[in-house]
Image (cartoon, rainbow, N blue to C red):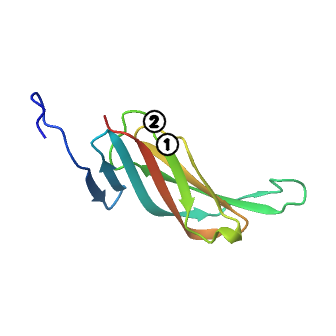
């Protein structure tokens, strides 16, 4: 739509990049990026939650967003694994271009599914 001085989008635009995930830009300036990836939860620490808690395993994977945010977005790490088996996920080291997705589990697991969702602004 043309407002007399510039064209303004009236609908969302989106794209998918096979390496970095997908994104959607909304006319109000909202930007959403998401990606499904895997993480190896194999780094271990003993008795992390007390002297008898046993082993806890960790893994991280870096995610470069498919497009850049104008400010630091809110990022959510969501485990696709069965929640009843002790998976915990979180996003860390968040910038306008990337973050680290982390996962912890009570067992060592290779190739655990994790989703990243980043929400912020593109303008």
Residue at image x 57%, y 64%? 40
Disc number placed over residue 72 in the picture, else none? 2
Residue at image x 43%, y 45%? 119
Disc number placed over residue 74 in the picture, else none? 1
**How far from the left and from the top, in percent, is residue 68?**
34, 41
Q: Residues within 10 Å of mark 1 (few under 14, many from 20)?
A: few
**How far from the left and from the top, in percent, is residue 29?**
32, 38
Q: Quadrant of the C terminus?
A: top left
**How far from the left and from the top, in percent, is residue 84?**
69, 70
Residue at image x 59%, y 54%? 102
**How far from the left and from the top, in percent, is residue 18?**
32, 62
Q: Residues within 10 Å of mark 2 (few under 14, many from 20)?
A: some
Q: Quadrant of the N terminus?
A: top left
Who is closer to the viewer here, 75 or 94?
75
**Figure quadrant of residue 111:** bottom right
Secondary structure at numbered mark 2:
loop
């Amino acid at each position: 739509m043309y407002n007399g001085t510039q064209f303004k989008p009236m609908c969302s635009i989106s794209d998918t990049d096979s390496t970095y995930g997908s994104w959607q830009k909304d006319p109000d300036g909202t930007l959403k990026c998401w990606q499904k990836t895997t993480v190896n939860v194999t780094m271990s620490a003993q008795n992390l939650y007390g002297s008898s808690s046993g082993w806890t395993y960790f893994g991280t994977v870096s995610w470069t967003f498919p497009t850049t945010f104008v400010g630091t977005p809110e990022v959510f790490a969501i485990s696709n694994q069965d929640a009843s088996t002790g998976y915990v996920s979180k996003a860390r080291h968040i910038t306008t271009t990337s973050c680290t997705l982390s996962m912890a589990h009570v067992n060592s697991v290779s190739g655990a599914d994790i989703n990243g969702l980043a929400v912020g602004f593109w303008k």
